[in-house]
Amino acid sequence: MTEDLWAAVDEYIADRLAPTDKALADALDASAAAGLPTINVSPNQGKLLHVLARMQRARSILEIGTLGGFSTIWLARALPGDGRLVTLEADPRHAEVARSNIERAGLAHIVELRVGPALDTLPELESAGYGPFDLVFIDADKPNNPHYLRWALRLTRPGSLIVVDNVVRRGALVDGDRDDPRVRGTRELYDVIASEPKLTAAAMQTVGVKGYDGLLLAVVNE
Ligand code: SAH
Ligand code: DHB
Ligand code: MG
């Protein structure tokens, strides 16, 4: 009952504020057809990422965890025509689906997709002189979140925004099996942020079509 109501309200909001279009619908269809897991951000969450990137006046975005490129499309659409979005994906099958979804959305000139475990591709980005990014969206394997947060710090500047998805996981954060590496990664992420003087952060619990979870926002201090 409660979860149904969360989903109904989420859909009501999304119908008005995050309506779908051909590129987004095609991206989800192609992802489903290719058997990708349906763990992309919801339409409302995608729109929120878009609004955050606009508030940030972002010209460059780094995304860790592409899947089929659904969040990538929402974020890349917030960039100016000469903006850049780099997105990192470990699974070549996911990357292939994402590449064609991004292409079909007309965003291939803005988005650079790098295939490989992010802990390999992040140092490559740094060596190649990428950054500082105006916004980083962390949404890959949760056990590595403390590492991704440290990399995000290296690849940003004062004023940059770091966004982390799935930071509550149905309350598993406090309630679940703390031996679960995903829960441990998330708890360690909070500890790293709490003891990092370069960051000012808040996390919000969220409900909706994806159930109960949360989103963390951290700004790099001036
Ligand atoms: N941001 C996407 C969802 C990402 S799901 C969206 O909202 O549309 C998480 C993705 O991270 C999956 O595609 C998974 O293959 C990828 N991933 C898992 N481990 C990774 C790693 N070590 N490096 C990079 N990507 C990884
Ligand atoms: C999972 C990953 C996600 O990024 C998400 O938004 C939901 C679920 C997962 O790995 O289960
Ligand atoms: Mg996620």
Image (cartoon, rainbow, N blue to C red):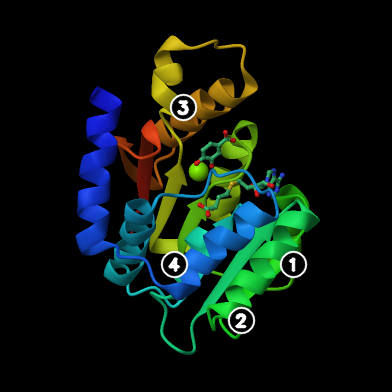
What's the distance in space between the residues labelled 2 and 3, CA to CA? 37 Å
In this view, the mark in front (4 or 1) = 4
The residue that disc 4 covers is 75
The residue that disc 3 covers is 191
Residue 127 disc label: 1
The residue that disc 2 covers is 108
What's the distance in space between the residues labelled 2 and 4, CA to CA? 13 Å
Between 46 and 165, the one nearer to me in the picture: 46
Q: Is residue 15 above or below residue 168?
A: below
Residue at x-position 45% and y-position 43%: 165
Q: Amino acid at mark 2?
A: Ala
- Quarter of the image where one finds residue 154: bottom right
Residue at x-position 66% and y-position 56%: 33
Q: Amino acid at mark 1?
A: Ser
Label 3 residue SS: helix
Quarter of the picture holding the C terminus: bottom left
Label 2 residue SS: loop
